[in-house]
Image: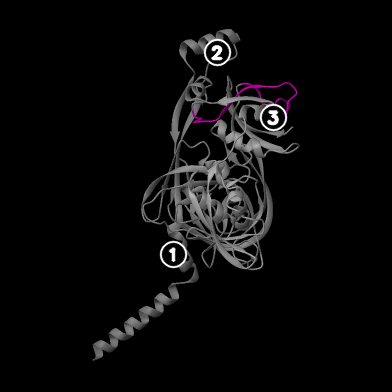
Amino acid sequence: MLVCILFVCNEALSREINSNRRTPIVIAVEKVGPAVANISTERLISQRHVDPFFGSRSELFDQFFNDFFGQTQKQTVERPLGSGVIIDEDGYIVTNEHVVSRASKIKVRLSDGRDFEATMISSDPISDLAVLKINSPTPLPFVKMGTSKDLMIGEPLIALGNPFGLENSITTGVLSAKNRTLTFNSEYGDIKYDGLIQTDALINPGNSGGPLINIDGELIGINAAIVNQAQGIGFAIPVDKVRQTLVMLFNFRELNKIWFGAQVEEQGGGLKGIKVSSVESGSPADKAHIKVGDYITKIDAKEILDILDFEKYILRKNAGDKLYINVNRGGYEIQIEVKLEKAPLPSIEKLALEKLGLYVQDLSPQLAKQLNLWWIKAGILITGAQKKSPAAEAGIKEGHVLVSVGQYRISTIEELGALLKIMQKGEIWEIGIVWSDKFGEHQGYARVKVR
């Protein structure tokens, strides 16, 4: 009898200890930890050997020297480490753009030990965000997105990630400040971040791209930067800004060339679904009689809560697929069948010349090698620029390779054409370019005004 009493007492004491140890921080980490992605990348790096005769030969002899002895460069591989976070069960991952830029291979490891090879979906170097995709036969754990509208100075925060290659690490702190504006040097030049969250939770190299969460286990930011030679000062991109960027990065029309044909917007006031704000004449949405003012609440079996849900779901589809869309029209629920089509494109080369003054063609692997841009998998080769055109005035010229337009990475002429179609006269677009010369490899941005 005494033994039983002691056992009951010990069990009660154990429950009390466990109760005290299972703090809100522990519970939050248990929620989010499985959705944290440890990211490693492989990059092909070109290193120029020291040439003792560099600058002492004529340009003609330099060319002969390179033709005869080959380029004085070698290729090595580095494996930088960073972090990311899964945002839905299909395996979409958000991270920093600088974590995966110029990667030839991206690998992801989850906390349960599973390894995946990830593909880049889209990225935006200006906001320093990128979307990756991993494929799993079963649904993946994901983080719940919170909001950065109601953040409170002093509230507890938790940073998760892969600092210095130490997988599945966490640090804790508080929200130190909101709406910080900082400028950081990067390979794209100076990048200005607005509206950053400041925290004293330690954010070290390798934490970049990982989640910053609140005590409820909700994503409230993406870890972005640290201040060198400063302790307890880290910064994250607030989740509301992340969400806005993701809507652009998941744009199914630009990525998969799928035409739905209706513009949508989010509504406040607790209304369900997203509101149709315009419909393109002759589009699939128009043919299916979707109307301005309709509220899209569900596509197939998927409930649509916001524009991000809408973009992500249709991104899975292909031209010819049918969608069964539930809309609320004037208080009545109706279902509409929409057959997706391939997005129509005008003559791309003509548009590039008319709007930007560029002569363009697809960059083949052979051309990339000839231009000493072996690390570029795909892009648009600039074969010329009209005199006094927007491109020429911005410094873009023959031999440059166009790799991004706005927030979109560009790999093919078709992708460029989709963006050229939406460019309006007078708009200014950021054009990402790379090129190689006798001084090495270069990359930069040009601001081009559409004519």
Q: Nearer the viewer, residue 203 or 372?
A: 372
As helix, strand or loop, the secondary structure at mark 3 comes to helix
Q: In whole angstroms, how far apart are the C-alphas of marks 3 and 1?
A: 51 Å
Instruction: Say which residue label 2 marks.
Output: 53
Instruction: Say which residue label 1 marks.
Output: 30
As helix, strand or loop, the secondary structure at mark 1 comes to helix
x, y percent for residue 27: 46, 68
Disc 1 residue type (three-letter): Glu
First of labels 3, 1 by sequence position: 1
Is residue 51 at least partly visible in the picture? yes
Q: Nearer the viewer, mark 2 or mark 3?
A: 3
Q: Nearer the viewer, residue 422 or 434?
A: 422
Q: In whole angstroms, how far apart are the C-alphas of marks 2 and 1?
A: 60 Å
Q: Where residue 433 is drawn, which disc sits there?
A: none
Q: Where residue 356 is drawn, which disc sits there?
A: 3
Quarter of the image with the N terminus is bottom left
The residues colored magenta run: 375-398
Disc 3 residue type (three-letter): Leu
Q: Nearer the viewer, residue 124 or 54?
A: 124
Q: Nearer the viewer, mark 2 or mark 1?
A: 1
First of labels 2, 3 by sequence position: 2
Quarter of the image with the C terminus is top right
Q: In whole angstroms, how far apart are the C-alphas of marks 2 and 3?
A: 41 Å
As helix, strand or loop, the secondary structure at mark 2 comes to loop
Is residue 225 at least partly visible in the picture? no
Q: Farthest bottom residue?
A: 1
x, y percent for residue 77: 44, 33
Locate residue 356 relative to residue 382 in the image: left or right: right
